[in-house]
Amino acid sequence: MSMRVTHRNLTETSLANLNTNKARLSRFQQQLSSGKVFSRPSDSPTGTSESMSLRSQLRANEQFSRSADDAQAWLGTQDTALQSSVAALHQARELALRGMNTGTASPQVREALASEISGLREQLLGYANANFGGRPVFGGTTDQAMAFSPDGTYAGDGGRVPRRLGESATVRADTDGVATFGSGDTSVFAALDRMAADLRAGSTTLGTNLTELDAASGKVLNALTDVGTRYARVVQDRQDIQDKVLSVTALLAGVEDIDLPRTITELKMQETAYQAALGATGRVLQPTLMDFLR
Amino acid sequence: MAPDPVTVASQVTEGQADLHPGMLRQGADHGGGHGQNLLGEPSETGLSAQLQQFWAAWQGVADRPDDLATRGQVLTTGTSLVTTLQDARLGMDREWGNTRTSMDALAAQVSTTASAVADLNASIRQLAGAGQPTNELSDRRDTLLQDLSSLTGATVRPVDDGTVDVFLGGQPLVRGATASVLAVAGSTTRAGQELDPVHFVFASGSPAEVPSGRLGAMQEAVNVTLPAAAARFAEVAATLATQVNALHASGQGLDGTSGRDFFTYTSKDGLAMAVTDASQVAAGAAGAGALDGSSADAIAAIGRSRTGPDAVWKQVVVDVAVATQAAGRRADIQDVVTREVDGARLGAAGVDIDEEMTDLLRFQRAYEGAARVMTAIDQALDTLINRTGLVGR
């Protein structure tokens, strides 16, 4: 005997199937209106996990990019200061040479040369105290406004100022003030002071002074090269970080965002299926034997 | 409907089939559904986004330890983390409390239903004894039994005199005309649950067991699912506090003081901020230069750690997601099973209009046939009475 099918059976089954269809329809509709494949973690646990990882990578890289901007600004400030310092030291060297050649020059001329050198020393001190955002870029981690006091003594603390450009990559954003300009007696400022004094006095030790100045200039030049190298690296890393941000964003979109044409097609198909189910239900539920017995 | 044991059995089958998806849905709702809503992931505003903002703020302090506004950012993002985690904790407490209250209401409903079944048992026994039909009363009792079954997973045993006994686990809830009163006992707060789990007792004092059904699912929610979920949330908060504090204490603030905690965490009160002044944020390593940022850099690195709070949180989200998905699937499967069983029951017990109409026609025809017989007899009698013996009249 075949299974007994009552009208209640038909109604219940139709209703259940209609509900299933409607649930599917609503899922596609939700995807389409939100633009996201999943809106709750249970929709796709793996997708959620991936999306969380990518989002945190994105945030981290955005922060690395900000740090790289900061490092670039620090190094840029040092670059400018060191370039100007090198130029000033060149000028001082020329003045010194002139003083040596015109060893017999009048005291007035020597005085003029000496005061020019003193002026250059003050300029140099200004460059050595260059600051970014209120912090002296050659002063390490000091909270003072100056890296060098007016007498040429180092006032910084020699600490390092690193900037994080990646999970395991940092770059030093400052430059060691002592290694660049020296400190106290051995500083480039003291060398210039001695040179100016010797010029004024007409001393014959100008040659030694010049060697001393050349050695100091060499240190500044080394620092400039070093800053330039680091600057180039930061620029490159910054580019890499921004590329990474773009690629992670693309990956995130791939994980989270819907495939629009596909979702629309599926929604349309589901709509058709729903309509068919409605039509079939309407047809099946209407007639009973009563409709045919008159 | 006839009160035969087969019908009762089919009713009960339906009841039990009904309770499983209900129970699983309930379980999914308590364990995952609501927990899942508390997660708020994946989004730009959920806990993981807030954690990332927190770490980014620390990296910012590593870059600008001198800037009070940047330091303040750490406090702001830290406070929002505390708020979110504490809200989740309170949300769990509320959820627990609501479920516990609903359990009391449902236990009362079970007791009233059981006593109604007992009353019907008494009436049915009386009527059946007097040889009266009990169909209507049996139908009413069947509906109540179905309710009981889906609430508690109770089992029903028909007795010869027309009554039914209802059992919860092994204990009788209804026996003939007497019903027991079910009550919920145990802790009324989530905090007290561990020492005093929520359980059931009869008014007589003997312990009761609710094997399944909505009430059973709720018991599991308050004793297992919700405490487990709350523990996972607490783990995130504890990891955050421990790891940040360890590094923070080894660093120094702008005032040169080190050894300060950034968060306070206790399992009783949860997470709170310990540092409230931006200058006390320990950005530098102790003993380093005044504007050192290495401590802040190290704290920011917690966000990328595989054992940090972010990783713990991600695991929580994924675990809840998988559990919810699995529960949802089981419920879907059970829905199909229920539909099959319901279909079979409706097929066996339901009314079919076509069938009734055919029967109606059959009886109508039979009636017509019977009426025709009457007419035939009438005609024969008429012939006998009125037409006979009239010869020669």
Image (cartoon, rainbow, N blue to C red):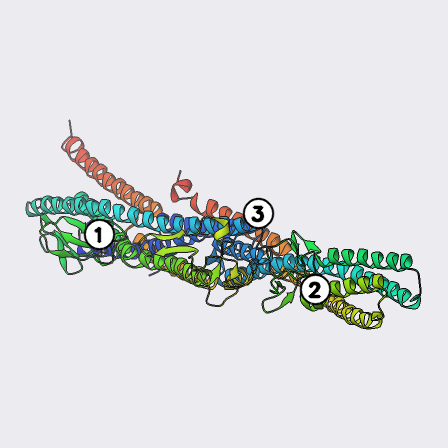
Give the amino acid at mark 2.
Answer: Val
| Nearer to the camera, B227 or B380 | B227
| Residue designated by label 1 | B187
Question: SS class of the residue under badge 1?
Answer: loop
> Could you give the CA–CA distance between mark 3 and mark 1, rounded to whole angstroms?
45 Å
The image position of residue A177, as x and y in percent, is 68, 64
Give the amino acid at mark 3.
Answer: Ser
- Specify few, some or many for label 3: CA neighbours under 10 Å numbering under 14, 14-19, or 20 or more: few
User: Is there a contact, CB below 8 Å, between mark 1 and mark 2?
Assistant: no
- The mark found on residue A234 in the picture is 2
Label 2 is found on which chain of the structure? A
Give the amino acid at mark 1.
Answer: Ser
The image position of residue B47, as x and y in percent, is 47, 54
Between disc 3 and disc 1, the foreground one is 1
| Residue designated by label 3 | A33
> Could you give the CA–CA distance between mark 2 and mark 3, rounded to whole angstroms?
42 Å
- The mark found on residue A245 in the picture is none
